Amino acid sequence: MRVVKIAKDCIKNNSFLHGAIYWSLGTKSYNRIVKQMKDMTYVIIVDAHVGHYMMALAAVRSYKKFHNLNQIGIVIPKKYSDMAMMWKDDIDEIITVDDAKDLFRLSHYLYIRKEMSIESDKRLIPYYFGNGEYGIIKWYVHKHYEFLNDNRNIDIKKFSDYDLSFSDVNVNSILRLNMGEPLSVPNIEPSENDIKLFEELGLPKGKGILLVPSAQCARSLDVSLMKKISEKAGKMGYSVYLNAGPNEKAYDDSVKTLSLSVTQTLKAAKYMGHVIASQSGMIDVLVLARFENIRVITYQGTEFDKRPGYFYEHQNMMLKETGLPSEIYVNVDVNADISQDDIVNKVFEGWE
């Protein structure tokens, strides 16, 4: 805790230096965005992880309701702006920026000014989901240093029970939505244009499986396991599509690749009817959409399992949020004696 206080004091004691640096980095982006802003609050959504964008968008409504805002907008990189349409009923305005680096700089700029108690446009809220240099937990600890220092035994998940002031929607997500508002339900229903595209691609309606085998936040599915999955799927009359990049090839001739935008991929999953995947933020969106024909294979006890029970904790939160059955998660203990055939049987249980 003392280290945190020292870091905060260093920022304040060098306010001129930091102010000069972040003013020069942020002003151009700041002025360009402010010119587009209407008279409402805007949350800047920027991160290095696509899953964090989606979880952030799902939490915007919580922030809007908690602060009794009539309208709320977002500022987001153009590359990820199509995802916002899954929550268009909860977002009143979208401002896009060509380069995500602009938003990172602007968030740094606003964060530093906030830490130094320097005035900036209060309609703009810097948003960090928790992994960046100025992650929200670090910010949260800064803001409530004295309280935390006097209450060292408090579980971070229970911070919000102490009626602390919040000023960022991130806290709502990290503290399990203890503000009282649930995450928004994303709309992954295919439009007429989406369906036309899927028909042109030959996607099977209701009898397809989208395989999403890898992500940044979980161990990828083994190729040998995926081959067993596609073999079983073929025997059951399902067609398997692999979520892939534009130039990637499938691991097996019986499997086709699907390379679409994130939003279109999620809608394609709904259209085809079934998903088998490793844990990721994109998969969390399907869960939040109450998509039941999904199996999330998660290896417990790997380097991705950040602390004992990390994945179970996350899964329990998602199950509580959505009311989906626990069978959607297929948990595999890496230290247990379980065969790939057993995993495959568990994945397809209920789909036969």
Image: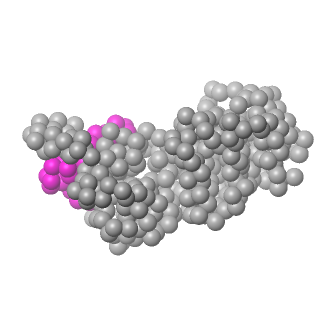
Q: How is the image coloured?
A: one colour
Percent position of residue 298, x then y: 65, 43
Q: Main secondary structure of the magenta part?
A: helix
Kindly identify the residue that appears in the image at 81 percent across and 28 percent down: 253
Question: Which residues, given as a range, are shown in magenta?
Answer: 99-123
Residue 228's place in the image compared with 94, above or below, is above
Q: Nearer the viewer, residue 191 or 3?
A: 3
Q: In the displayed structure, would residue 192 be above or below residue 310? A: below
Lateral position of residue 246 relative to residue 271, left or right: left
One can see residue 157 in this view: yes
What's the residue at 64%, 34% (across, down)? 220
Q: Which residue sits furthest right?
A: 235
Q: Position of residue 190 (x, y in %)?
A: 65, 56
Residue at left offset 70%, top offset 42%? 332
Q: Is residue 171 visible?
A: no
Front in this rendered view, residue 171 or 118: 171
Q: Position of residue 227 (x, y in %)?
A: 79, 32
Residue 107, image quadrant? top left
Asked if the stretch drawn in magenta spans residue 102, the answer is yes
Location of residue 209 (image quadrant): top right
Task: Say left or right for 232 vs 337.
Answer: right
Between 5 and 175, which is closer to the camera in this rendering? Answer: 5
x and y percent of residue 239 in the render? Answer: 81, 42
In magenta segment, residue 169: no
Horizontally, residue 176 falls left or right of residue 300, namely: left
